[in-house]
Image: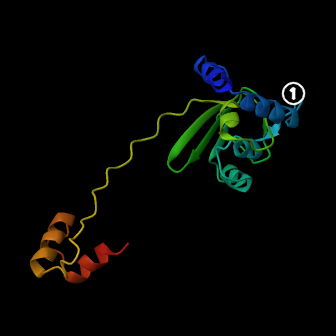
């Protein structure tokens, strides 16, 4: 019976009671009455970056901007600030909804900001690796030439072909 009520609440768009409790705990532990939070601590707490020290490094490297300006790790964030974080060839654009200091779970973290980031670029299609039949033995010269042709290494000398095959 309780599971049916939980399913009905989830379908109606009501937040999970555990999530509500976690948000309340995070806000209680966070800043009060208009206080602010360090930007490196906040991007770590809302799970935009793996560690706080990586957040500080990103700030020092100029990968974090608040309201369009490069910031130091100790820059104070306020509700409504726009944070731009550049990482792994992608820019995350978020607007601060709630200030928290302690790291929280992903469902709670998502409710602390509005994500205005563009969608990630599509992943490159990687051709499947060729698989030889088990027990087929060593490839013949003809087989090697065919594999080189498929890889686009046709016409290269053996030393250049070996260098191109190294990771």
Give residue 86's quadrant in the image: top right
Question: What is the basis of the colouring in this image?
Answer: rainbow
Image coordinates for residue 133, horizontal then vertical, percent: 20, 71
* Nearest the eye: 165 or 157: 165
96 lies left or right of 27: left
Q: Using the rendered view, name the quadrant where residue 84 is placed.
A: top right
Give the image location of residue 23, x and y in percent. Answer: 77, 31
> Could you tell me which secondary element the residue under label 1 belongs to?
loop
* Rendered location of residue 148, percent (x, y): 18, 71
* Quarter where residue 146 is shown: bottom left
Q: Looking at this rendering, what residue extends furthest in the left direction? A: 142
Identify the residue position indicated by label 1 in the image.
34
In the rendered view, does 55 fall on the left or right side of 167? right
The extreme front residue here reads: 1
Marker count (numbered)? 1
> Which of 66 and 134 lies nearest the eye of the viewer?
134
């Amino acid at each position: 019976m309780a599971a049916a009520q939980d399913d009905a609440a989830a379908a109606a768009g009501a937040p999970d009671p555990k999530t509500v409790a976690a948000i309340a705990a995070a806000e209680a532990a966070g800043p009060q009455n208009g206080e602010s939070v360090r930007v490196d601590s906040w991007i770590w707490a809302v799970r935009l970056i793996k560690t706080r020290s990586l957040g500080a490094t990103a700030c020092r490297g100029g990968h974090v901007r608040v309201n369009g300006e490069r910031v130091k790790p100790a820059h104070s964030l306020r509700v409504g600030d726009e944070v731009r974080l550049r990482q792994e060839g992608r820019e995350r654009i978020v607007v601060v909804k709630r200030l928290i200091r302690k790291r929280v779970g992903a469902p709670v973290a998502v409710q602390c900001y509005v994500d205005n980031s563009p969608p990630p670029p599509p992943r490159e299609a990687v051709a499947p690796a060729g698989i030889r039949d088990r027990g087929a033995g060593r490839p013949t010269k003809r087989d090697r030439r065919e594999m080189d042709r498929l890889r686009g290494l046709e016409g290269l000398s053996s030393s250049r072909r070996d260098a191109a095959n190294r990771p």
